Amino acid sequence: MKALVWHGTNDVRVERVPDPTILNGRDAIVKITSSAICGSDLHLLDGYIPTMQTGDILGHEFMGEVVEVGAENKKLKVGDRVVVPFTIACGGCFFCNRELWSLCDNSNPNAWMAEKLYGYTTSGLFGYSHLTGGFAGGQAQYARVPFADVGPLKIPDGIPDGQVLFLSDILPTGYMAAENCDIKPGDVIAVWGCGPVGQMAIRSAWLLGAERVVAIDSVPERLRMAKEMNRAEIINFERDDVFDRLKSITGGRGPDACIDAVGLEAHGATLDAYLDQAKAAAFLATDRPNALREAIFACRKGGTVSIPGVYGGFLDKIPFGAAFQKGLTFKMGQTHMMRYMKPLLDRIERGELDPSFVITHRLPIDQAATGYRMFRDKQDECIKVVLKPH
């Protein structure tokens, strides 16, 4: 089969690789009909996530048709159309039983790696380094899905792939980010980053009752999408002082909650942002957290900072004194996917949501490497790329 394979920093290639096979009775093999490039994938391309190995298949946003089912899998049958969540969960451990699916104790075969870095293991993730299990990803023609009696969500016929594909990651991720804000009537929510997750967080904030949503970025097409398609007020951080604008918008109080949808490769126009870039380039820092610093500083007293943006290592010069003195609440983490997929599918079926608005480019899998570069370098007003493997 064809798949997008990692060979090193800034080196991904479409190659022929062996087809996946059933390894466990709860597995399924999915023929992929649509896959997407996620902003988190760019951290792999840029070499920020450790334990990648030459030959790893990328991709964690995908859906398709079940073509083979393990003997112990009673949930799925051949021919089922499914969306596959990016997190892998066993369904039976302490954390799965509490719907903390992304914290599953049993789905990461390389738990020892995560334990050394984080103290405890993460769940397994598709296509996202050996730190999270080394599972082959979904930017391919076929994928093996472990614990396929837990994760995949069956999709009714008649709904286009584009409307449901993002149930695999960015829609639940943006929704959980907004839900973590504990939005009350009248709340003002500020969102750093107008990429795909940021756009979903903005739309979710409206769904959950926000009175105003403010979007912060510097890329014109992303700001335009946030304003024209998601009704957000916008701040271009290259032109305006974000803190001053947010204080002005909120009458001096600050946003009730701040969402950092940027993560470890943040860009900025402030001194700390330039220092982050220099230190990361010199391997003196693991992450560039200037968006998080800004969110902490801008959030109102007693407010919430919600973090769906991926961080991988150790953060430098975080204003924790400000967080403490203001009594901020922090909520973060990989998305507990299975908690959100079915309710969000119901919203899509009722016409309340159509996440396909974020798609700007559709490419055959043979052009996946071009899609990565286009997305990373923000060429041709690229915001979201969907790949067609067949």
Image (tube, rainbow, N blue to C red):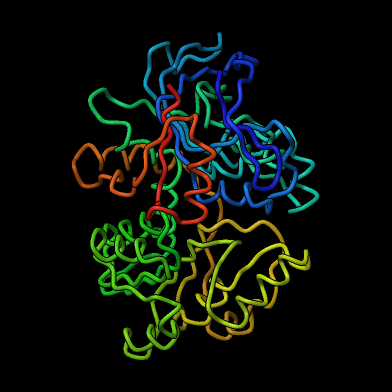
Q: Tell me which residue sits at (65%, 15%) in the image.
A: 23
Q: Tell me which residue sits at (55%, 69%) in the image.
A: 267
Left or right of 118? Residue 96 is left
> Which quadrant holds residue 379?
bottom left
Q: Look at the image and tell me in which quarter the C terminus lies.
A: top left
Between 264 and 78, the one lying in front of the other is 264
x, y percent for residue 83: 41, 30
Task: Check the image and report above or below for 196 versus 350.
Answer: below
Between 211 and 184, the one lying in front of the other is 211
Q: Tell me which residue sits at (46%, 31%) in the image.
A: 84
Left or right of 354? Residue 33 is right
Q: Tell me which residue sits at (74%, 39%) in the image.
A: 111
> Does residue 24 appear anywhere in the picture?
no
x, y percent for residue 337: 47, 42
> Does residue 89 appear anywhere in the picture?
yes
Left or right of 153? Residue 274 is right
x, y percent for residue 41: 56, 46
Which residue extends farthest top? Answer: 71
Disc tally is 0
Task: Check the image and report above or below for 297 versus 368.
Answer: below
Task: Check the image and report above or below for 61 versus 242.
Answer: above
Between 156 and 217, the one lying in front of the other is 217
Which residue extends farthest left? Answer: 351
> Which quadrant holds residue 26?
top right
x, y percent for residue 212: 27, 72
Q: Look at the image and tell me in which quarter the N terminus lies.
A: top right
